[in-house]
Amino acid sequence: MKEILKNARLEKQFSTRKLAELTSIDQALISKFETGNRIPTKIQVQKLVEILNLNLKTTLVVWYKVKIQNEFELNPFVIQAITELFNEKGFDVVKHENKEKIASILDEIEILKQKLTNLK
């Protein structure tokens, strides 16, 4: 996310100050977005996309990925929860023949984590 925003701003030859004026987003926040110290809100992303002529779909996908990574520790439980959520909503993101393999791998990971915890 940070690279997309910074590269687009530089391509437009905008300073962070100019981009702040055009988007009504604080200049310090824009700097923090570009360093990865802050994640913009969805509304801020939409403003930046409009001013920087970015692809909304592509930018929002990247934004969601960053947001998910920052909000959740991506462990087997989170991955399983996301997979189940997709399945409940009718999105079959994993081929049926791979579901059992994935479940088995997630179980193995959990067993290994428990063994490592017991070694401490």
Image (cartoon, rainbow, N blue to C red):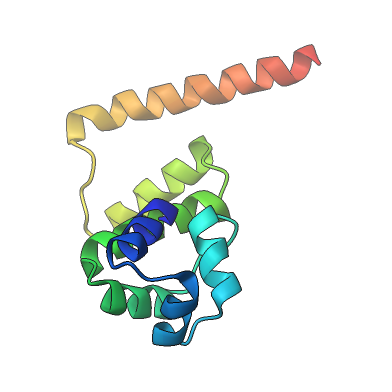
Q: Position of residue 30 (x, y in %)?
A: 51, 69
Determine whether 28 is above or below 70 in the image: below
Q: Position of residue 83 (x, y in %)?
A: 35, 47
Q: Residue furthest top?
A: 119
Determine whether 15 is above or below 90 in the image: below
Image quadrant of residue 31? bottom right
Image quadrant of residue 89? bottom left
Determine whether 41 is above or below 38 in the image: below
Can you see residue 89? no
Who is closer to the viewer here, 46 or 76? 46
- Which residue: 81% across, 16% down? 120
| Numbered-mark total | 0
Image quadrant of residue 37? bottom right
Does 96 sit left or right of 35 as displayed? left
- Which residue: 30% across, 58% down? 61
Q: Position of residue 114 (x, y in %)?
A: 67, 22
Does 110 sit left or right of 103 as displayed? right
- Which residue: 40% across, 58% down? 6
Determine whether 46 is above or below 64 in the image: below
Q: Residue furthest right?
A: 120
Who is closer to the viewer here, 54 or 8? 8
- Which residue: 36% across, 80% down? 47
Can you see residue 68? yes
Who is closer to the viewer here, 20 or 119? 20
Please identify the quadrant where the N terminus is shown: bottom left
